[in-house]
Amino acid sequence: MYYIDLAVTGISFGCMYAMMSVGLTLVYGLLRILHVAHAAVFALGAYMTVLVANASGSIAIGFLAAIIVTPLFGMAIYRLLYEPLLKYRPDVPMIASVGLLVLMQDAFRIVFGEQGVTFHRNAFSFTTFNFAGITVSAVQIAIVVTAAMVFAGLHLFTTRTRIGIGWRATVSRPQIAASFGIDPIKVRYLNFAIGSALAAIAGGQVALLNNLVDPGIGFVVSYKALAIIVLGGLGSVRGTLVASLVLGLVEAYGTIFIGAWLDRDAIAFLALILLLMVRPQGFTGARVA
Amino acid sequence: MSAYEISILSIVGINVILAVSLNMISGFCGQVSLGHGAFFGAGAYAAALAMVSTASVLFALLAALIAGSLLGIVVGFASLRVRSDFLAITTIGVNFLFIGFVRKQAWLGGEMGISGIPATGLGASGNMFMILLFAGATIAFSVYVSRSWMGFAFRAVGEDEGAAATLGINAGAYKVAAFGIGTALAGLAGGLYTFFTQFITADAFDFIFSVMLMAMVVIGGIGSTSGVVFASIGLTLLPEAIRFVNDYRLLVFGGLLVLVIRLAPGGLAAMVRNLVIRVRGT
């Protein structure tokens, strides 16, 4: 039973990683920028969810507010920080992005305090269900269901709607897509908006899971997300999904097998470095370097 | 000199060595490393173990130098396989792995770190002079390398590996060399840090510290030894001089990093250069 409990933990973490990472991989696919500050968007989503939920008394309104505000923030990052830096080497916008993350993290600490914020009323955190001896919390179910819905929706959006198809066209052949009348700049904003909204949902769910948002919330997750998108073969949403679930499970089981000599949070990077050394082009064969 | 001034000058010296050595890797050779803290830490831990077992300063410094450069050469080989921003991620990974590994090792003191490291016997001001001496030597070495054939080859590799290869420059060998030299100096700084504090924990070498070092390099002007030296001295003293900055250190460092890259990607060095050109031009 213990092993199945670990699987439940692993899958729910994997779904959370997937929602966090998909925004990163989309940005990389379109602009070739490693959007490290995505973690700041994630943290902003978590804070918004908790603060608005506390002010309004409804967790749903908290999520709604986060989903509305974070895309604006994500698009502002693109407009003010990345767009002017696109002409430089890819590590230049990346370092700027790291700077922004450090700055935002400290800003969260200063504004909302070292201790972080908690939900006043959060029934979900403590609600658990028991299926034949396996304990599953309500938040874990919510995370898995939302992730499934989000990815199904994203799939329909990118295959069935004109905007979605235009988006995919721009990612794979920007110039040809532009010659068909798709505005590449609008696609970029769309990209940041959707990626940021997904990160905000993931952030809010982590807040529910831990019943706490502290300034460091986005930090470790963000670097894991970097590892995930490389493992998933950069720019590939499907690869990112698989890598997220695998990492969630490996971490859950890894803590018992190698937890004695390596921190749980370092496992993702061990996997990443091993993979890069063996296959610098990633799992799926897309060139990394 | 008061004890406070001695400790500040010691930290300035250590940060100068770290920033200048990072500049040799990322500035001269163009290999962005966001895990310099790991090499610094490797040196510090090696020196701590050496001091605890032998209490020999020379042996500890050698151990620090070797530990830093061994880890650095391994990462240097990684730089042959992954490039640019992916190398940066790999080095972030190395930093997290280093911390994650050290925290779980009983023989490295685990979460508690290593305390009670024997003193060097030079006293606080003696330590400070040793640190400043090494800092001066590091600066001189950096200026020498930048003017040598090796510095030329580093810059060629940093600008365009393919073009460098057509000139007969073995890009891979120079990248590994840049990592080996830069990280050996970072290891040395780690050894000096161990002498200075006589107590180390993994947290001192975390990723945030690596970002602060990168901030010093970028703000000073990536590739310019003098710019980096000024920036590392200034950014180390700034939190001490202004109380506000000390409370909001990361806010200020992160903000400066974003502003400098956004408004003046060449850093302080390029700003001074442009100013000189403008003054001479008129």
Image: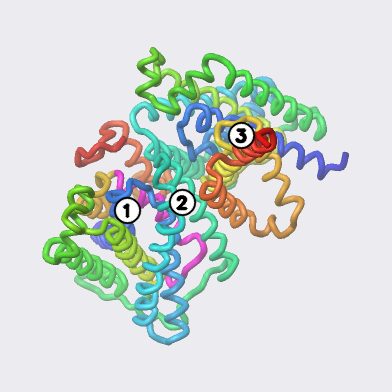
Q: Is residue B279 left or right of residue A5?
A: right
Identify residue for label 1: A27
Q: Is residue B188 left or right of residue A134?
A: right
Q: Write down the chain letter for disc 2.
A: A
Identify residue for label 3: B18
- Relative height, residue A257 to residue B69 (above, below): below
Q: Write down the chain letter for disc 1.
A: A
Identify residue for label 2: A97
How far separated are the C-alphas under marks 2 and 1? 13 Å
- Relative height, residue B56 to residue A45 (above, below): above
Query: Reading the chain from its start, which is encountered first: label 2 or label 1?
Result: 1
Query: Which quadrant of the figure contains the C terminus of chain A?
Result: top left
Q: Position of residue A32 (x, y in %)?
A: 33, 46
Residue A92 located within the stretch drawn in magenta: no
Q: Residue at x 18, y 68 (%)?
A: A153
Element at label 2: helix
Query: Which quadrant of the figure contains the N terminus of chain A?
Result: bottom left
Q: Please name which of the two marks, 2 or 3, marks the residue nearer to the observer.
A: 2
Element at label 1: helix
Q: CB under 8 Å between callouts 2 and 3? A: no
Q: Is residue A122 left or right of residue B135?
A: left
Residue extent of the magenta highlight: A210-230
Residue A281 versus residue A87: which sits nearer the camera?
A87
